[in-house]
């Protein structure tokens, strides 16, 4: 059965590739030619499009900001948008042109959304979804954020989550926080988006961003990934820095 279905799938997908530009033309077109579409692109595809001058970081960020504006009122995957996102995109674009191609990181100019428990020392708040932390000032960027910025990634905003990563109360529903409201599963709005890194998964699934970070203690990356049909990676605890991430357990927390 499996070997029979493979050629059919290939035929179907090549038909789709032919049809996609036709289907997309007229409406808001996100294909920039040669079958490249932001919605289905991996980070490597995006880097290739940058390299071939098919796409800039500014265009990519503008696309995501439009998606957030259009879909977030329903999906509530994003709590805050970075007011400096377009400025950071322009910086990434000029950095790309001035640096030797081989010296650029694979994340250069790629927009990334961070779960709202990951500290950023910028215009964004870090609140774990709770009003209790609104206006608090973090001492500096989280360890993972320092690395992302060094790699040239663009912090586009903060993702919603189950408030306090569901630690304050098990009665907080998956994906709900007082600041973010109820995050929704983009495939079936009435379905459980799972938690607590709900917004990180919802936003990637609905193309509000290319990549996101969440945090896991006992399922909060893998469960929302599976519920919202995206790939989630839970690194072995200790392999990624937890510095300046609102904690639950030092023995279990991991950022991924
Ligand atoms: C952070 O929170 C303050 C309220 O304390 C708000 O005025 C500001 O707009 C928030 N920042 C962003 C980037 O949304």
Image: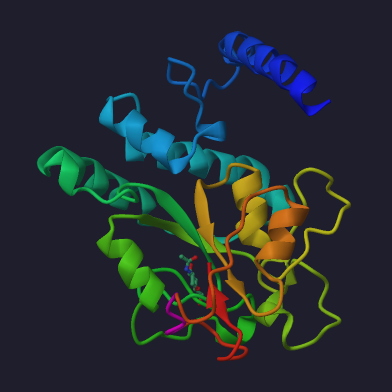
Tally of numbered discs: 0
Front residue of 126 and 249: 249
Give the image location of residue 52, x and y in percent.
Answer: 28, 25
Task: Give above or below for 39 relative to 240.
Answer: above
Please, what is the dominant secondary structure of the magenta stretch? loop
| Magenta residues (range) | 240-244
The residue shown at (58%, 72%) is: 215
Left-right relation of 104 to 2: left
Task: Give above or below for 141 relative to 65.
Answer: below
Left-right relation of 162 to 22: right
Left-right relation of 218 to 249: right
- Asked whether residue 184 appears in the rendered view, the answer is no
Left-right relation of 90 to 84: left
The residue shown at (40%, 72%) is: 144
Front residue of 104 and 179: 104
- Asked whether residue 134 appears in the rendered view, the answer is yes
Q: Return the residue found at the far bottom.
A: 250
Give the image location of residue 110, x and y in percent.
Answer: 38, 47
Task: Give above or below for 45 relative to 254.
Answer: above
Give the image location of residue 228, x and y in percent.
Answer: 73, 51
The residue shown at (43%, 42%) is: 43
The residue shown at (47%, 23%) is: 36
Query: How is the structure coloured here?
Result: rainbow
Front residue of 202 and 89: 202
Q: Does the magenta stretch include residue 22?
A: no
Give the image location of residue 48, x and y in percent.
Answer: 34, 32
């Amino acid at each position: 059965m499996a070997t029979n279905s493979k050629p059919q799938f290939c035929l179907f997908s090549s038909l789709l590739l032919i049809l996609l530009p036709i289907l997309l033309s007229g409406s808001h077109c996100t294909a920039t030619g040669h079958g490249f579409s932001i919605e289905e692109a991996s980070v490597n595809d995006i880097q290739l499009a940058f390299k071939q001058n098919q796409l800039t970081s500014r265009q990519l960020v503008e696309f995501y900001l439009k998606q957030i504006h259009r879909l977030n009122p329903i999906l509530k995957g994003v709590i805050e948008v970075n007011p400096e996102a377009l400025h950071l995109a322009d910086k990434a674009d000029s950095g790309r042109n001035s640096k030797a191609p081989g010296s650029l990181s694979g994340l250069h100019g790629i927009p990334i959304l961070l779960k709202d428990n990951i500290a950023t020392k910028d215009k964004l708040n870090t609140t774990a979804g709770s009003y209790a932390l609104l206006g608090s000032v973090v001492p500096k960027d989280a360890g993972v954020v320092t690395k992302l910025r060094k790699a040239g990634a663009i912090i586009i905003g903060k993702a919603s989550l189950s408030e306090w990563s569901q630690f304050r109360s098990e009665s907080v529903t998956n994906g709900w926080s007082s600041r973010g409201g109820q995050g929704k599963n983009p495939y079936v709005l009435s379905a459980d988006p799972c938690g607590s890194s709900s917004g990180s998964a919802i936003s990637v699934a609905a193309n509000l961003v290319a990549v996101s970070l969440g945090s896991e203690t006992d399922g909060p990356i893998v469960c929302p990934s599976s519920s919202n049909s995206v790939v989630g990676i839970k690194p072995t605890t200790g392999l990624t820095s937890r510095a300046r991430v609102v904690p639950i357990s030092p023995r279990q927390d991991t950022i991924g």
